[in-house]
Amino acid sequence: MSDTAAIPVWINGQPDTRVPVTDRGLAYGDGLFETFRIAGQQPVLLDYHLDRLMLGCRRLHIPLQRDALLAELAAWSGMSRPGVVKLMITRGSGGRGYAPASDLEPRRILQHFPLPEYPDAWFQQGIRVFPCVNRLGHSPLLAGIKHLNRLEQVLARAEWDGIDQFQEGLVCDLNGSPIEGTMSNLFIVQNQQVLTPRLDQCGVAGVMRRWLMEQFRAAGLDAMETTITLDGFRVADERFFCNSVFGVWPVARFEDNHWSPGPVSRLAQQLIRSHWF
Amino acid sequence: MSDTAAIPVWINGQPDTRVPVTDRGLAYGDGLFETFRIAGQQPVLLDYHLDRLMLGCRRLHIPLQRDALLAELAAWSGMSRPGVVKLMITRGSGGRGYAPASDLEPRRILQHFPLPEYPDAWFQQGIRVFPCVNRLGHSPLLAGIKHLNRLEQVLARAEWDGIDQFQEGLVCDLNGSPIEGTMSNLFIVQNQQVLTPRLDQCGVAGVMRRWLMEQFRAAGLDAMETTITLDGFRVADERFFCNSVFGVWPVARFEDNHWSPGPVSRLAQQLIRSHWF
């Protein structure tokens, strides 16, 4: 297809832009999603995205077939055009009431968006981070997976306007421990250790977080999941956010603090650049 | 209109059955809903439903106009036909990303369903209750309101099949304290006190629960919100579930226990019958 042709939204393998009001994703947030970057003509970390999606399907008991989904992705024009792909999976259409019928066909929704244009300064000098007041609740049942129940993220992101003054927000859990950004995962570096918050009570286990953990360990760094305190975040040697769309943004400003990007932040950016984008 | 004509689904005041994939209710569960019974030609507890809906809109910062919604409801044929009305409100359509644009028009979705046909025995002798293993997480930010992030209810209700063997499930929070049913609220009676679980960490504050609390107090009963333990549930003098569709179901069986409906359960049923249905 031509590079200028619009990329159609696909629903269940067909061009369409609307879903029935009976969809359980709409009714209950009963589903999952993935957002991945297409760099050049290749999806970034596609296997990792599908791993997490299938884990989510198992935990929610949604009978999605990975091979059939892959075939559908391969047939869609959006998979080879630079930008951002949003893949939503819902349990399908059902009647009123929480009980899911056992014979529902999961609905697959594919959308393609332009890659956001982020200033180079956010990569080079780092970002300014908003201290979100809203807290992530504790729900081990739903922690880690990227389900469609995202009101906490919506309310945290609504605490500040636009993206010029603050580029990301730091979100803590009910104990006041930093967990993640509103749309990204968090790392800090302290005493030669690379630390990222445990996500067994809340938070989304990002695919870039997983890949970076593997890369840090392969590079001989002491990288681990742990509980991070807000003071630990403040006094760390480095702190940065990551996701699979923007890569790594070091934190330059938080409250009255000013920092410069450190060596692990730079290593993470270099790893992503050499492997992905 | 004729009593046999189908009642159309309305979206934003127009007959329609589908929403755009850009709807934030679908993308993030970014919205609220109400389910109310039409008894005879009158909606039951409509003011209480709208009170809770508007409270939810304030907490989620959704700019819904109560008067305009009431006018839309009044113009829709489903409001005067016996059955169950489901009203969904979403923040509207927005682009990719959690940040809600400030100028979105909330989307209103109106659906009408037949009244479920429940056997009289469930009212008279009581129901059998499934002990759900899945726990409600703690999220003060979202507790109490009837938002569209309902995966916990879906997973709790998926723990048993059908409605013949078990009619409702008892759901506890992370502390193991009973909070509610999967689709209804809980009361117990102990030592002349009528108790219902506090809903400041999780759970949905049902409109029938609110109305019954007011009625119990008006009748001189000592009715209060508190923390209930699982053992307290087991040894109570009475226990019953309520919602605005089925009214009150006493609990007849739970684990190996058998109970008969008590006087407060009967009073609640009588109050609903004399006022509503």
Image (spheres, coloured by chain):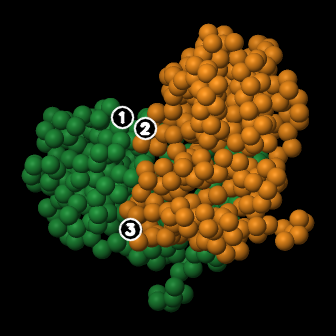
Chain colours: A green, B orange
Q: Amino acid at mark 2?
A: Pro
Q: Tag 3: residue type?
A: Ser
Q: Report crowding for label 1: few under 14, some 14 to 19, many 20 or more residues within 10 A (C-alpha).
A: some
Query: How many dots with numbers?
Result: 3
Q: As drawn, is B168 to the left or to the right of B66?
A: right
Q: Which residue is mark 2?
A: B140
Foreground pick, A84 / B270: B270
Q: Residue at x 48, y 49 (%)?
A: B55
Can you tell which of label 1 and label 3 is closer to the viewer?
Answer: 3
Tags 2 and 1 touching, CB below 8 Å: yes
C-alpha separation, residue under disc 1 versus residue under disc 3: 28 Å
When the figure is inspected, residue A259 is found, relative to residue A116, above or below; the finding is: above
Q: Residue at x 20, y 64 (%)?
A: A165
**Mark 1 belongs to which amino acid?**
Leu
- Labelled disc at residue B102: 3
Q: Mark 3: few, some, or many residues within 10 Å (few <14, many ≥20)?
A: few
Q: Quadrant of residue B264?
A: top right
- Where disc 2 sits, the SS reads loop
Q: Which mark is residue A174?
A: 1
Nearest the eye: A148 or A50: A148
| Same-chain status of marks 1 and 3 | no
Protein chain holding label 3: B
